[in-house]
Image (cartoon, helix red, strand yellow):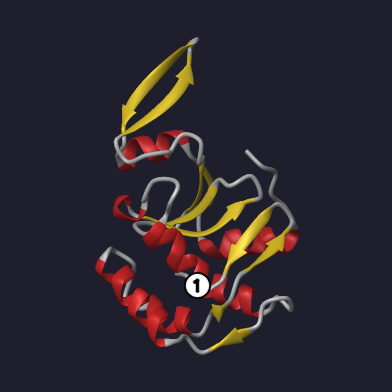
């Protein structure tokens, strides 16, 4: 599922790749324990890049930043237990996540996902608090692509407008 993204990253000239170090390998194992598919480990180990790459309106993450976003996630909320794996962000900070259940790609608004207890949203002229759960995170988020391959093709085509 993540292979098209890793292939795309490896084609970016501004990212310098290397083998994952021991700390990154340990962090990948921690990600597997939290829900990341184990078959992603070899692919991500080969995507070890320091930093990130700007691509239009996106900041695309290499391995170190992917680990940071999915394990440290401060400030913000951890969406990995809800089945969303962060791989990038919009330039304004909204997370770009792969749905681990169906492979779709979502834009998750950082201003609504500030903690892991409630989602505060303004609708119909009033503030509403929703429980922080998978259904509500998807409710306030936007599905950008039905698959990671479609997401990568849209990156190549520069077909995204920030939602």
Single out the residue that lies furthest toward the left: 33
Near mark 1 (Cα within 10 A), the count class, few <14, some 14-19 or many ≥20, is many
**Towards the viewer: 124 or 89:** 89
- Quadrant where the C terminus lies? top right
**Towards the viewer: 50 or 58:** 50
Question: Does 106 appear above or below 14?
Answer: above
Residue 136: x, y in percent? 35, 35
Residue 145: x, y in percent? 55, 52
Residue that label 1 marks:
64
Q: Write the residue at 60% across / 70% down.
A: 51
In the image: residue 2, left or right of residue 162? left
Element type where label 1 sits in the image: helix
**Towards the viewer: 77 or 79:** 77
Q: Write the residue at 58% across / 76% down.
A: 50
- Quadrant where the N terminus lies? bottom left
**Towards the viewer: 137 or 18:** 18
Q: Quadrant of residue 35?
A: bottom left
In the image: residue 132, left or right of residue 108? left
Question: Does 143 appear above or below 9?
Answer: above
């Amino acid at each position: 599922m993540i292979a098209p993204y890793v292939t795309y990253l490896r084609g970016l000239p501004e990212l310098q790749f290397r083998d994952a170090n021991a700390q990154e390998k340990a962090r990948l194992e921690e990600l597997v324990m939290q829900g990341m598919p184990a078959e992603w480990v070899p692919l991500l180990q080969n995507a070890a890049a320091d930093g990130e790459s700007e691509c239009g309106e996106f900041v695309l993450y290499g391995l170190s930043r992917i680990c940071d976003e999915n394990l440290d996630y401060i400030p913000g909320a951890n969406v990995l237990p809800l089945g969303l794996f962060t791989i990038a962000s919009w330039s304004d900070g909204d997370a770009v996540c792969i749905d681990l259940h169906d492979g779709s790609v979502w834009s998750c608004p950082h201003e609504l996902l500030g903690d892991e207890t409630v989602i505060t949203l303004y609708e119909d002229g009033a503030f509403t608090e929703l429980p922080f759960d998978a259904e509500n995170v998807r409710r306030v988020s936007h599905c950008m692509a039905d698959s990671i391959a479609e997401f990568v093709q849209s990156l190549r085509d520069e077909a995204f407008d920030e939602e």
